């Protein structure tokens, strides 16, 4: 089986209010890319990775007038994708849903949220002292993680959690001091969300369940100047320490072990004021110890770092046109 996580930048803007694909020459929200160009590129990437299930980060939005599931299934129908059924969990108001698009002939998915005293359901509130002032702070997810119970065609079950953790930009800051103050507060909230997610992970692992945690954690070793202040990144919190109840992703472990050498990357952003591109490792597929024992294989479909992606000019161009993130796939015997 092949599972993937793929952050499709502003996927929502490729659909109209009837959840129909808009494939024309109007501009998408991608820089210098039309909606037709982005839609064709996204479809080309989906076909190339040929995954049985794709966790779509920044999926089309869900609210009273729009359906993320309908939009994704219409997209799959328009391009003849075998991943033709979609599912979401708790919706949000950011126009960036977390969804799964999957092949129902290979695997089925059911929204199966969990709530405990230590880790409430992800659409509820989490209480934790963020700033060590002996007072509980209230934390909510702007994008509640997607919790799925998956079953393969041969009856094997595993849990899949899709996440998009993100520290908000310092909106409203009027000077450098306020930028720092707001940024630190937002980073605290992101780390609290990582702790919340980690407690759910431990719950599943201690119950002996096979678990995959995938998505965009938007944080990692060496990513920004606040890492030293807090000691650990969200990635390290979610994965856990080496040993009991830890998850594994080889790209994350490689990055954590390298301070100066080159590290894997899954995204490429244009920094306009510096006229250059920034690359970062943001997207992960983490597995529990029992799944790691099955010798799974990970791959980052990077247009420049992956040899096969680079030599296939059509795929390389599609990856660059479709999104500022690149898919990460996991091949595993389930």
Image (spheres, rainbow, N blue to C red):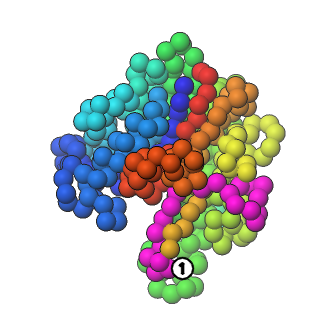
Looking at the image, the residue that sits furthest to the top is 154
Q: Who's the residue at 57% across and 85% down the image?
A: 177
Q: Who's the residue at 50% across and 74% down the image?
A: 276
Q: What stretch is highlighted in magenta?
A: 255-275
Q: Who's the residue at 34% across and 41% down the image?
A: 43
- Vertical placement of residue 150 versus 270, above or below: above
Q: In this view, does 95 lie to the left or right of 220?
A: left
* Residue 29: % across, % down: 31, 61
Mark 1, other Cα within 10 Å: few <14 / some 14–19 / many ≥20: some
Residue 197 appears in view: yes
In the structure shown, which secondary structural element does the residue marked by tag 1 occupy? Answer: helix
Q: In this view, does 281 lie to the left or right of 39?
A: right
- Vertical placement of residue 272 versus 330, above or below: below
Nearest the eye: 211 or 14: 14
* Residue 244: % across, % down: 80, 37
Q: In this view, does 108 lie to the left or right of 137?
A: left
Looking at the image, the residue that sits furthest to the bottom is 175
Q: Mark 1 points at which residue?
A: 179
Question: Does the magenta segment cover residue 264?
Answer: yes
Question: Does the magenta segment cover residue 75?
Answer: no
Q: Is residue 52 left or right of residue 330?
A: left
Q: Quadrant of residue 208?
A: top right
Quadrant where the N terminus is found in the figure: top right
* Residue 222: % across, % down: 68, 65
* Residue 249: % across, % down: 67, 43
Residue 116 appears in view: no
Nearest the eye: 183 or 114: 183
- Vertical placement of residue 289 versus 154, above or below: below
């Amino acid at each position: 089986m092949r599972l993937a996580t793929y952050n499709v930048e502003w996927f929502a803007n490729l659909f109209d209010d009837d959840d129909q694909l808009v494939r024309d020459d109007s501009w998408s929200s991608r820089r210098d890319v039309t909606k037709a160009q982005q839609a064709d590129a996204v479809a080309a990437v989906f076909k190339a990775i040929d995954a049985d299930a794709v966790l779509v980060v920044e999926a089309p939005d869900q609210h009273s007038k729009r359906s993320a599931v309908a939009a994704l299934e219409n997209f799959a129908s328009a391009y003849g994708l075998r991943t033709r059924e979609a599912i979401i969990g708790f919706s949000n108001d950011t126009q960036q849903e977390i969804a799964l698009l999957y092949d129902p002939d290979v695997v089925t998915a059911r929204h199966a949220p969990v709530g405990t005293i230590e880790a409430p359901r992800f659409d509820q509130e989490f209480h934790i002292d963020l700033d060590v002032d002996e007072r509980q702070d209230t934390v909510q997810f702007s994008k509640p993680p997607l919790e799925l119970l998956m079953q393969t065609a041969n009856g094997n079950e595993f849990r899949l959690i899709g996440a998009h953790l993100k520290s908000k930009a310092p909106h409203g800051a009027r000077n450098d001091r306020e930028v720092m103050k707001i940024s630190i507060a937002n980073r605290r909230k992101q780390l609290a969300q990582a702790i919340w997610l980690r407690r759910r992970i431990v719950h599943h692992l201690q119950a002996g369940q096979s678990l995959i945690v995938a998505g965009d954690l938007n944080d990692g070793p060496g990513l920004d100047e606040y890492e030293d202040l807090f000691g650990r990144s969200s990635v390290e919190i979610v994965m856990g320490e080496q040993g009991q109840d830890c998850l594994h992703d080889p790209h994350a472990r490689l990055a954590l072990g390298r301070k100066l050498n080159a590290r894997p990357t899954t995204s490429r952003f244009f920094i306009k004021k510096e006229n250059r591109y920034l690359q970062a490792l943001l997207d992960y597929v983490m597995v529990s110890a029992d799944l790691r024992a099955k010798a799974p294989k990970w791959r980052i479909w990077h247009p420049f770092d992956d040899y096969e992606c680079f030599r296939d000019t059509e795929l390389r161009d599609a990856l660059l046109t479709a999104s500022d993130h690149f898919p990460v796939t996991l091949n595993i015997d389930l």
